[in-house]
Amino acid sequence: MQPIYQSYRQIQQFTADVAHELWTPFAASQATVESALMIPQLDETEARDILQTIQRQNQRLTTLVADLLFLSRLDRQRVPMRGECCLDDIVNDLVEEFAAMAIAVNVKLTS
């Protein structure tokens, strides 16, 4: 019975992790939009920066969904693993994720 319970717990943890990973870019995009709406007059540069931030978060969501599809296919077929990641993307995601908190305490985050 213990192996079945262990498998069940792993599935629960995986589901929670997936939910968190998908929720994070949505929350960051929402915070970006809310922050932009609080600015009375957006100039073109600010608007472009905001749109680029939202675009990066949407790309992150696209990558997460593609990774989930990849994982679901692992059970059905043998797929070569890729072992690379871009540190710049990770840092940019973190900056975007904490942007709303930074704005709230008047801190400017850059990467």
Image (cartoon, grey):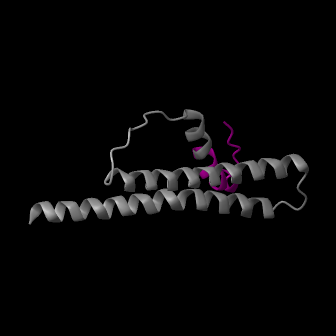
25 relative to 52 in the view: left or right: left
Which residue is depicted at the point 17% across and 65% down? 5
Q: Nearer the viewer, residue 46 or 104?
A: 46
Which residue is depicted at the point 32% across and 54% down? 76
- Please, which residue is most extreme toward the left here? 1
User: Which quadrant is the C terminus positioned in?
Assistant: top right
Residue 110 within the segment the image draws in magenta: yes
User: Residue 64: where, in percent of width, then height?
Assistant: 51, 53
Which residue is depicted at the point 74% across and 60% down? 35
Magenta-colored span: 94-111
3 relative to 38 in the view: left or right: left
36 relative to 70 in the view: left or right: right
Q: Is residue 8 above or below residue 90?
A: below
Q: Is residue 46 above or below residue 37?
A: above
User: Residue 7: where, in percent of width, then height?
Assistant: 21, 61
Question: In the picture, residue 91 is in which quadrant?
Answer: top right
Q: Is residue 31 above or below residue 82?
A: below
Question: In the picture, residue 75 is in which quadrant?
Answer: bottom left
97 relative to 9 in the view: left or right: right
Q: Nearer the viewer, residue 1 or 53?
A: 1
User: Residue 58: where, in percent of width, then height?
Assistant: 64, 54
Q: Can residue 18 be seen by looking at this rendering?
A: yes
Q: Can residue 98 be seen by looking at this rendering?
A: no
User: Residue 90: where, in percent of width, then height?
Assistant: 55, 40
User: Which quadrant is the N terminus positioned in?
Assistant: bottom left
